[in-house]
Image: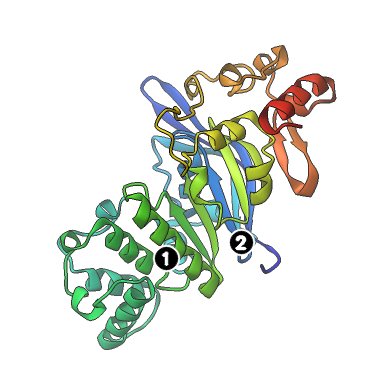
């Protein structure tokens, strides 16, 4: 993996103004993405994963959205200072995004080949024959069979998995520096999900793209991500190397997410594990830690004050009072129960 920070998010706060109040979607978060790295951002629906990354491409709807504070630095330049044309020049060429549902991203009245060629023409001067040849090459790269024939077909003639491959082809058409994949396999069955993730991993290695993978399922990123960020109620609760997150989670919320991942060793008599309770209202946030009401290790201070970040080994960080020096007994209880230490 190449060295150097390609993207830096600093003190980013995003709100949405609604008729019932201000939704605090993203609350003062910081993270970065290195050259050639795969970063996974995981968490339940409403945790702020997609909102924080959509802001990178200027996709926050303003209004009702509002970027209250922060910087989004791409190669040292703040994208929040860019105008619409400057962002358009970057989107699709240097930073690309794959969205959850390809049917809402593709034009149902336009042939697939034409849609891929349009993206190529936006950022490069190509003849019609050159862009057609490139579109066929891209369809081959992402694993779409009979690419020459399928170039002339419409979106409704493709399966869900093949449509997502088309979206990947469009996203990588101009060899971007950063690829953002926002829940790219949500509507697909498990077998197709696995195929898509394997394809993404191969493309990431082949093109050396820095990749941000957004998902609610920790189980799908094990073989792909270098680092994992865990978000909850608009905050980063934990950040660490992938192996650390899987084998030694520091935050009770991360431990709960891991237990909720279905096992391949199916037992019909064993119930699926869940995290009890519901996430807090993003309009009326609790006074202390947002996870306190659902946490089996919560202390009085957890409901009274927001915890700071505690820096641990290998640059990991965790937003949890368990790592305060005064919480040694409660931390010991957590470690013993969660991983027998």
Occupied quadrant, residue 247: top right
Q: Which residue is mark 1?
A: 92
Occupied quadrant, residue 112: bottom left
User: Which disc number belongs to residue 243?
Assistant: none
> What residue is at 31 percent from the left and 50 percent from the top?
101
Report whether 324 appears left or right of 160. Answer: right
Query: Callout 1: few (<14), some (14-19), or many (20+) C-alpha neighbours within 10 Å?
Result: many
Residue 164, percent from left and from top = 32, 59
Residue 58, percent from left and from top = 45, 51
Q: CA distance from mark 2 to mark 1?
A: 19 Å
Task: Confirm whether residue 317 shows in the render.
Answer: yes
Image quadrant occupied by the C terminus: top right
Query: Callout 2: few (<14), some (14-19), or many (20+) C-alpha neighbours within 10 Å?
Result: many
Q: How many marks?
A: 2
Name the foreground residue: 218 vs 152.
Answer: 218
Name the foreground residue: 188 vs 268.
Answer: 268
Report whether 253 appears left or right of 307. Answer: left
> What residue is at 19 percent from the left and 78 percent from the top?
149
User: Which disc number belongs to residue 37?
Assistant: 2
């Amino acid at each position: 993996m190449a060295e150097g920070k390609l993207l830096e998010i600093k003190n980013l706060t995003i709100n949405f103004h609604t008729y019932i109040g201000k939704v605090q979607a993203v609350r003062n978060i910081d993270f970065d993405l290195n050259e050639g790295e795969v970063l996974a951002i995981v968490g339940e629906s409403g945790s702020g994963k997609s909102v924080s990354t959509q802001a990178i491409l200027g996709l926050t709807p303003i209004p009702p959205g509002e970027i209250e504070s922060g910087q989004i630095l791409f190669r040292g330049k703040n994208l929040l200072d860019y105008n619409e044309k400057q962002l358009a020049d970057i989107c699709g060429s240097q930073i690309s995004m794959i969205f959850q549902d390809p049917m809402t991203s593709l034009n149902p009245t336009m042939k697939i080949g034409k849609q891929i060629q349009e993206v190529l023409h936006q950022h490069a001067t190509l003849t019609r024959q050159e862009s057609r040849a490139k579109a066929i090459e891209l369809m081959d790269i992402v694993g779409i069979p009979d690419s020459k024939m399928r170039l002339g077909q419409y979106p409704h003639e493709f399966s869900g998995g093949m449509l997502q491959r088309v979206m990947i082809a469009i996203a990588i058409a101009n060899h971007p520096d950063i690829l953002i994949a926002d829940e790219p396999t949500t509507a697909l069955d498990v077998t197709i999900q696995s195929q898509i993730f394997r394809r993404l991993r191969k493309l990431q290695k082949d093109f050396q793209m820095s990749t941000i993978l957004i998902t609610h399922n920790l189980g799908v990123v094990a073989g792909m991500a270098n680092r994992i960020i865990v978000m909850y109620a608009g905050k980063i609760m934990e950040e660490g190397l992938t192996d650390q997150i899987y084998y030694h989670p520091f935050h009770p919320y991360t431990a709960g997410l891991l237990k909720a991942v279905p096992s391949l060793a199916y037992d019909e008599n064993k119930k699926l594990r869940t995290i009890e309770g519901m996430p807090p209202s993003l309009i009326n946030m609790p006074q202390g830690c947002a996870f306190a009401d659902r946490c089996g290790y919560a202390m009085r201070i957890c409901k009274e004050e927001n915890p700071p970040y505690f820096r641990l080994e290998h640059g990991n960080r965790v937003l949890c009072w368990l790592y305060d020096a005064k919480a040694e007994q409660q931390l010991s209880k957590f470690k013993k129960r969660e991983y027998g230490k």
